[in-house]
Image: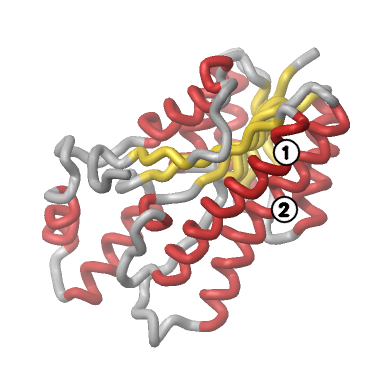
Amino acid sequence: MTKTAIITGAGRGIGEGIAYRLAENDYAIAVADINFVSAKKVAENLKQQGDLAKAYQLDVANRNEVFDLVSEVIKEFGELAIFVNNAGVTFIDSFVDSNPSDVERLLDVNLKGTYWGIQAAAKQFQKQGRGGRIINAASLAGVEASALQSAYSASKFAIRGLTQAAAKELAKDKITVNAYDPGVVRTPLRDAIDQKTAAIKGLSVEKQKESVLKEIALGREATPKDVAEVVSWLSSPSANYITGQSILVDGGMRYQ
């Protein structure tokens, strides 16, 4: 029976990197993204490489859509093995000036979307009766809050909490729940963060990037592949005894 990995927010950036990496491990890949054009492009690239893949349009903030996605994937591929709650959004603004609609949308996507993903995956794994892996996108900003990203930081702290709570409840079903905490990863989302942050601070974008780079012990930004390698390990037999953990992938910006 084909074993499948569902990855939300897989149309670009870190999610896209995770999709390609898990395909190398012989999983069928359900490429889920709110942008169906992007999801379809990634799925087509995977299929051209000889991998099993299909694109799905998904707004993770909609609980029904998340549960429907799992049902559709099972009909297509047969069995769920991994669910990666990667989808997320952010915005840059001062705490006191943050727009309520921006805050609400961010929490709907990042926090509620992860909650629904854990629920939907766990119910499917319980039905299958063979355990499973749930892997969530937290962040360095969920370990130490980032200025100008108050709502994002709050959502990522909360995701680490959800990861621990779910791990405790689902261990009896042999379902592990872990998270990855990326630092600075060069993606289109990071480009937007740097541009807005630089504008607020009155810096050039290059100066903004340089100031952040100085905080990274290994001297370089992460790539989506760096994060995908951690997700690959968390989904492998080597991580059978790991649950409830959040792993920093930040090149040495913070130490726990």
Q: From the top left corner, tell me how far across and down residue 221 is, in percent.
A: 24, 41
Q: Mark 1: which amino acid?
A: Leu
Q: From the top left corner, tell me how far across and down residue 235 is, in percent.
A: 57, 25
Look at mark 2 in the image and give the residue it sits on: 116
Left or right position of 164 against 203: right
Question: Measuring 17% from the left and 60% from the top, which residue is drawn there?
Answer: 208
Of residues 159 and 72, the one drawn nearer to the viewer in this rendering: 159
Q: From the top left corner, tell me how far across and down residue 170 is, in percent.
A: 72, 38
Where's the C terminus, which quadrant? top left
Question: Measuring 64% from the left and 19% from the top, which residue is drawn there?
Answer: 27
Q: From the top left corner, tell me how far across and down residue 96 is, in percent.
A: 39, 86
Q: Mark 2: which amino acid?
A: Trp
Task: Look at the numbered disc 2 and give the secondary structure of its residue.
Answer: helix
Where's the N terminus, which quadrant? top right
Residue 9 in view: no
Q: CB of mark 2 within 8 Å of CB of mark 1?
A: no
Question: Measuring 12% from the left and 60% from the top, which residue is drawn there?
Answer: 207
Q: Quadrant of residue 248?
A: top left
Residue extending furthest toward the bottom: 96
Left or right position of 236 against 150: right
Q: Is residue 33 above or below residue 104?
A: above
Q: How is the image coloured?
A: secondary structure
Q: Is residue 29 above or below residue 195?
A: above
Of residues 51 and 113, the one drawn nearer to the viewer in this rendering: 113
Left or right position of 131 against 107: right
Question: Measuring 30% from the left and 38% from the top, which residue is drawn there?
Answer: 222
Instruction: Give the mark, 2 or 1, whose residue is nearer the N terminus.
Output: 2
Look at mark 1 in the image and give the residue it sits on: 170
Crowding at dot 2, Cα within 10 Å, few <14 / some 14-19 / many 20+, comes out as many
